[in-house]
Image (cartoon, helix red, strand yellow):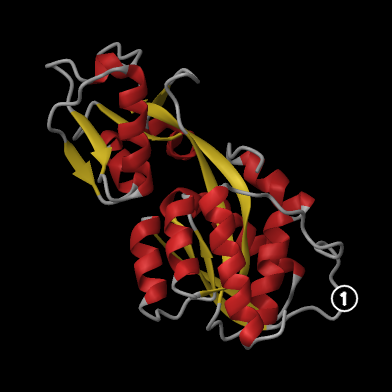
Amino acid sequence: MKPGRGAAVGASVALSLWVVGLSVFAPSAGAERHTAGPTGSITVFAASSLTDAFTKLGRDFERAHPGTAISFSFGASSALATQVDDGAPADVFASADAASMANVVRSGAIRGRPVVFARNRLEIAVEPGNPLKIHSLHDTVKPEVTLVLCASVVPCGRYALESYAKAGVRLPEVATAENARATLTRVALGEADAAVVYVTDVVAAKNEADGVTIPARENVVAAYPIGVVKETRNRALARAFVDSIMSSRGQRTLRQFAFLAP
């Protein structure tokens, strides 16, 4: 799509799609072909739960495209969306929820139509060995358990509240952290006994935390959309990076980090 009035039309179409429901689009036919190839550098704003997977995807992309550099700014999707709207120097935005992406689409900060590239689900993170024998969301609110959740204004916090509501568990007042990784760190450091984060975060913690499965009927599946920022300094490279995420190779990498298919 060429810049100009078409970008505004694309933003309008994208916003409509987020309102009625998420759609998944296939990558372009040449997503894994590297002919002339892009050059230069871009900055990708991405949800904190993508830290490990995107770091690897960025390194893989740079190796496949000599002369490129991919840098990242990881954080809570809602905070990153606000930064993109405020004109932060981002070229690509990858969110852990549709709502944050819808906000930047509505403002016209995203070029064209965002695509869902992965999904995720929640899990209870506990101390290694699960010394307090936490086996359900009900167990996390027992008096002897110190629970920490993501702040309610960020995606993982909203998802957690939804999960507790599905389970019929009334939450007491609990400590919160700014994003999924910061929340998990409280458990890894022994500052909390349990946290509700993403499965991918527990996998990334390795031996610093164990995971307790939340049943499907109580769980929430998060859709992760990605889009090119309208004011990108390098549209060709930004588009190529998004295509690499949607390619079969990029999708295999995401599966390695426990993300679900889009």
- Look at the image and tell me whether residue 62 can be seen: no
- Look at the image and tell me whether residue 259 can be seen: yes
For label 1, the residue is 35
How many numbered marks does the figure carry?
Answer: 1
Where residue 168 sits, quadrant-wise, is top left
x and y, in percent, of residue 150 in the image = 28, 42
Residue under the image location 51 percent in, 53 percent down: 19
Q: For the residue carrying disc 1, how many other residues have a C-alpha within 10 Å: few (<14), some (14-19), or many (20+)?
A: few
Tell me: residue 52, above or below residue 92: above
Residue under the image location 46 percent in, 17 percent down: 215
x and y, in percent, of residue 45 in the image = 47, 66
Tell me: residue 190, above or below residue 77: above
Residue under the image location 63 percent in, 65 percent down: 113
Is 232 placed left or right of 61 in the picture? Answer: left
Say which quadrant the N terminus sits in. bottom right
Tell me: residue 97, above or below residue 123: below
x and y, in percent, of residue 41 in the image = 59, 81
